Image (cartoon, rainbow, N blue to C red):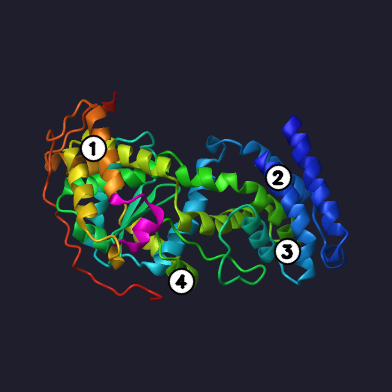
Amino acid sequence: MKTILSLLLFCALLPAAQAQGGGFSDILRSVTGAIGGKEASTPAPAGQTAVLGVRGMDEGDAKTAAPATGDLKLLEGWAVGRKEAEAAALRRGLTARPVSYE
Amino acid sequence: MKSSLLLSGLLAAALVSASSGVLAQSRNLDLGSIFDTAKTLTKSQSVGAMSEEEEAAIGKEVVAATLGSYPPIRNPGLQHRLNQVGVWIALQSSRPELPWRFAAVESDAINAFAAPGGTIMVTRGMLNHVTNEAELACVLGHEIGHVTRRHHIAVLQKSLLVSAGASALGATTKTGGSAEYRRLLIGESKEIFTRGLDRGAEREADEDGILLAARAGYDPAACLNFMQRLAALKADTGALAALYKTHPTAKERVVDVDAALGKLKGAAPGDGARPELAMDAAAGGQKPRSR
């Protein structure tokens, strides 16, 4: 029901947003605002890839930083496999045990 | 089936509405894309409907964006050790087969981030706040819990209809269906991640943190100690500002963590290891970008 309502809102907002000369990013923001989302303070131009934020991340940082795709390779280089992790845990005196919640 | 037809009809109505305005004069709408999106939407009514590949692709974008603000600490020894600990804890989870990656990032804030697909980022401030490896295990276990339960994906999927509507217009850019669709989905995550998850999801993740730490052989009481020390800090300090925008207060979480410890079966508080934290977070410093 909520999704249907959202779509109907989209239908209603689309012509208005277009009439204002906005692209689809503006329309998306209009719909998001209509269903309770927080409107972005700095609208991105239509077609521009949105800058991401992560839970708990400072919103200012999220809006100004460019994606660091090159750093993803660094993360891959630091990756550890199952056997290495298990061996390291054993050296630290850690042993897996069955634990659950009642 | 009924909801699928209804949805398709509404999307068609949206198309007609759009065609009657300025849009129809300047853009070439792609009916196929609209109905493909509707199909995807209908299939994605449950969290489990998204494939691991899609989850990983979204996660990769989220990680790249996060590293754009908080670059990884250039200390391979620290990062390697963090991955050894993180993977060991993740192996105790319900999704041990994910390509788990862990990264310490430049930020004095006390925080940690989970991206869909299995990448966890921990700030320098957090590494300086934990006093032993067991406390770090609680933090990593909390973030692993968000990933295994697909908390962020679930929130994203709730906003799929909005993305679907935008995708109908985005199709005119002729950039390709799935890539465009994913981009819109990621765009939605901007709002969701900066607002955070609900209290229930955070409580679940706290419980997972305790459970995974205990399963990995650590003293689960370390989770309570960590939270109590967090609660003792002034809430309005800069290091905690971002955390408290998106999480319940540490004082509330102390109550939740204490209750969870009481329900634990197979490891009592005090039963388990508290290894020294063999990570020098002070080394390999680099200023965060864009600050």
Q: Is residue B284 left or right of residue B63?
A: left
Q: Are marks 2 and 3 in contact (CB under 8 Å)?
A: no
In the rendered image, which quarter contains the C terminus of chain B? Answer: bottom left
**Secondary structure of residue under mark 2:** helix
Marks 3 and 1 share the same chain: yes
The chain holding disc 1 is B
Q: Quadrant of residue B9?
A: top right
Please name the residue that numbered disc 3 is placed on.
B173
> Distance between the Cα atoms at labels 3 and 1?
53 Å
Q: Is residue B243 magenta?
A: yes
Q: Residue at the location (12% across, 46% down)?
A: B275
Q: Quadrant of residue B23?
A: bottom right
Q: Which mark is residue A5?
A: 2
Disc 4 marks a residue whose amino acid type is Ala
> Distance between the Cα atoms at labels 2 and 1?
41 Å
Q: Residue at the location (22% across, 69% down)?
A: B284
Marks 2 and 1 share the same chain: no
Please name the residue that numbered disc 1 is placed on.
B258
Q: Which mark is residue B125?
A: none
- Are there few (<14), some (14-19), or many (20+) residues within 10 Å of tag 3? some
The chain holding disc 2 is A
